[in-house]
Image: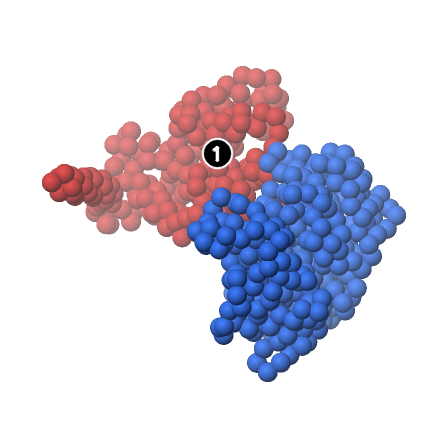
Amino acid sequence: MTTIIKNIQTSWLKYATIGISGLIAAFIVTLLALIVTRPTLEGLITSITSSEIHFAIMLSLSTALISTILCIIIGVPAAYALARYSFRGKNIVNALLDMPLALPPLVAGLGLLLFFGTTGFGMGLAEMGLEFVFTPLGIIVAQWFVNMPFMLRIMRSTFESINPRYEYVAKTLGCSDSQALWRVTLPMSANGLFAGSVITLAKGIGEFGAALLLAGAIQWKTETLPIALFLNMSCGNLNMAISAATILIIISITALYIFEKFGGSSRF
Amino acid sequence: MLQIQNLSKDMGEFFLKNVTLDIEQGEYLVIIGPTGAGKTILLETIAGIYPPDSGTIILNGKDITHLPPKERNICVVYQDYMLFPHLTVEENIGFGLVLKKMPKDEIKKRVTDAAKLLSIDQLLHRYPDTLSGGEQQRAAIARAMVMDPVLLLLDEPLSALDGQTREMLRKELRRLHALYNITIVHVTHNFEEVFALADRVAVMNEGDIVQCGVPDEVFRKPNCSFIANFTSVENIFRGTCTSQEGASAIDVNGLTIISSTCKGNGEVYATVRPEDILLSREPVQSSARNSFKGTITDIVNNGMVIRVTIDTGIPFVSVLTRQGFDSMNLKEGEDIYLTFKASAVHVF
């Protein structure tokens, strides 16, 4: 008798939970469809081909590309250290490096604004011509800071999944430490690196909060796709806003697909 | 050739404790010990992967304790092959030669020679994950051999392979050792590899070498109960094998043991599991081809089973259940017959 009740309960739970996940999926599809189908096709095409959206696409792409490269240059070595070496304070460093992930992007942006706008170091950089406040450079830094933990976590788990004995063998065959990393571990991490880059790039293109505070929302200057969406929405220019959103949706779906295909094994 | 003196290294779970070991030129040394004995960390410390906490390693008169691995010319082959998955077999074998900046045609020639030596020359263009375990291990051995190392370290190289492949590769290792007179240190937990390959065997436990010597001596006269228990090799005999119609006769100190698994003639080791030996008061008429008379020299009660040692000129150990033992009423010093089938004799 008890087993029968238990069976009924299990199947009740099964259908309820499946139902909930189905509802969420349907809700997501509804939202995306609402955005994409809102304007007429003609209006959408006009907006997408407009020079303002064109500018936003180019600015988003170029800043995201540069910030992704920065994430690789800085995140990969840090991830390697955290995966391979044990050192004092490693746990604290690990937690701190993940911090931007939990931080609201607006707060991160505020911190960056204060750093580059009010400290001697930031003002010194500005005097040297490296102006980050309300400039495209600021967008790059904001994207880099917010997206770094993603690259770091993906690469850390990638490195951790590679047996260090591959490097040991390489060293006995004549590699120095850095050669073993360059010739063996990095090529073996290619999938993780690719997945990390795709996610960083896609998130960089969509970065809003931190970039808004540091680089501002200045039309034709720091107007990335999300900023274009925000500015045009604010002044009731719905077609332009939606065309920016549509492009962002396409980028997200593509990135998700690529990530699932190549980086499925990376946890982050 | 290689002198290890008072080597210590603490890595938490695994550690070395004052290891002292001399390895001679051209020797095949097998290190045997249970999991966690520190065998792998000893090999990796010899290779220079970790700096030891204390102690010295001297290679051909030169102190290499703090030399980086690439300057030691000591190669390692692991149980899990560790072939670089992003490189072909050819690129894997040539990996070290490329780092030596050797001319391309010279690399090609050496890689091909090494591949031929290990019968994997048909697989050079393939990637490691398309190879069988045995093929991968051959490639890993070729990758080490091509470097012409002064010392070859093998970390349980046969443990991941199935029985038949393991036996083939074991023969291959013996052949390579004979061919190049290369000094080999081979770590294992399989005692068959000790008898099949070792010039000398070192037994390791809890980070230290507890006994070192020729296999016969170590296994016959273990210097502590740990070795006796760990090896727990009973009824292992060295003898001369001669083929007889369908079976083989192994002459062990004048006693002839018939085996159905012996291949070819020559020096072999034979083992019989204690539980395969039947004890009886009178000679048994059966198809079993081995039957001897001996004297009970020792009876040990292990709780579950009773171990009886019988001297027939060579010592045999048999186990009995408590019930069987009680009904036979055996006592030390009594004469007894023991019988076992030819198929129960394992030869290697």
Any part of residue B141 in sight: no
Name, please, the residue furthest toward the left.
Answer: A1
Q: In the rendered image, which residue does mark 1 sit on? A: A149
Estimate the x, y position of residue B121 in percent, counting from the top left: 64, 73
Label 1 environment density (alpha carbons within 10 Å; few <14, some 14–19, many ≥20): many
Depth check: give the residue in front, B176 or A241: B176
Q: Residue at x 29, y 37 (%)?
A: A241
Q: Residue at x 57, y 35 (%)?
A: A82
Task: Kindly indicate which chain is depicted in red in the rendered structure.
Answer: A
Quadrant the N terminus of chain A occupies: top left
Q: Secondary structure at mark 1?
A: helix
Task: Kindly indicate which chain is depicted in blue in the rendered structure.
Answer: B
> Which quadrant of the view contains residue B336?
bottom right
Estimate the x, y position of residue A224 in percent, counting from the top left: 41, 37
Depth check: give the residue in front, A108 or B329: B329
Depth check: give the residue in front, B330 or A211: B330
Q: What amino acid is found at the position of numbered circle 1 in the picture?
A: Pro
